[in-house]
Amino acid sequence: MAVREKGFPRGYTFLKIVNFREVQMPLRSDWSAKPCPIARSLDVLGDPWVVVILRELFTGNERFDGLRDRLEVADTVLSKRLNVLVDAGLVDPVQYGGGSARARYEYRLTGAGRETLPVLHALAQWGAKHKSDGDLRSSTLEISCARCGETANSADWCTVCNLPLDAASTQWRRPTDSSVALRLASPSSD
């Protein structure tokens, strides 16, 4: 509700929020039923936390604590995003410990989750080309074919081997430690 506060000149209008919960707006609409496949995909993959969680799952970082520590994310944020991934069928929670009071889970990529790898590659390649901080060596995630060792020029295909880039045939070098090639985690069976 707009009100005019005393002591301010005419023409200044302030919004007085009486109860924040009543006026809080969602960040965006639900796009899950849109006819556009890009909109439907963004309904899940359009959240930056979801994308970096997927990145970590591909590297084999599957446990809640490991994800939280690597991403430096709040428990509530991580929990909500993992639930989104589970609900979307991209991740399966697999209990590995804990009792009935507090079960512990690993989050494993499903077949649909593994199919997001080219999306991550495309984002990394686009970011390296268009969002560099100027020092490409320190900001670029290098994606290469584990079979031939060549840097990938495509998000989903090795142009040297002429074979697809999947989790089993891809390695990454992180900007923070480019001396170590990181083999992606072996795919779990569905």
Image: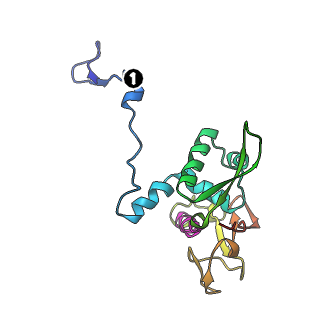
Q: Secondary structure at mark 1?
A: loop
Q: Is residue 143 above or below residue 8?
A: below
Residue nearest the observer in this picture, 117 or 83: 83
Q: Is residue 118 above or below residue 64?
A: below
Q: Which residues are magenta?
A: 114-127
- Quarter of the image containing the C terminus? bottom right
Q: Residue at x 72, y 77 (%)?
A: 146
Q: Residue 172: horizontal and vertical position, in percent?
A: 69, 68
* Residue 31, magenta (yes or no): no
Q: Residue at x 37, y 48 (%)?
A: 29
- Quarter of the image containing the N terminus? top left
Q: Residue 4: horizontal and vertical position, in percent?
A: 26, 18
Figure quadrant of residue 33: bottom left
Residue nearest the observer in this picture, 47 or 134: 47
The majority secondary structure of the magenta stretch comes to helix
Q: Amino acid at mark 1?
A: Asn
- Direction left: furthest residue: 10
Left or right, 11 with reference to 33: left
* Residue 115, magenta (yes or no): yes
- Direction front: furthest residue: 100
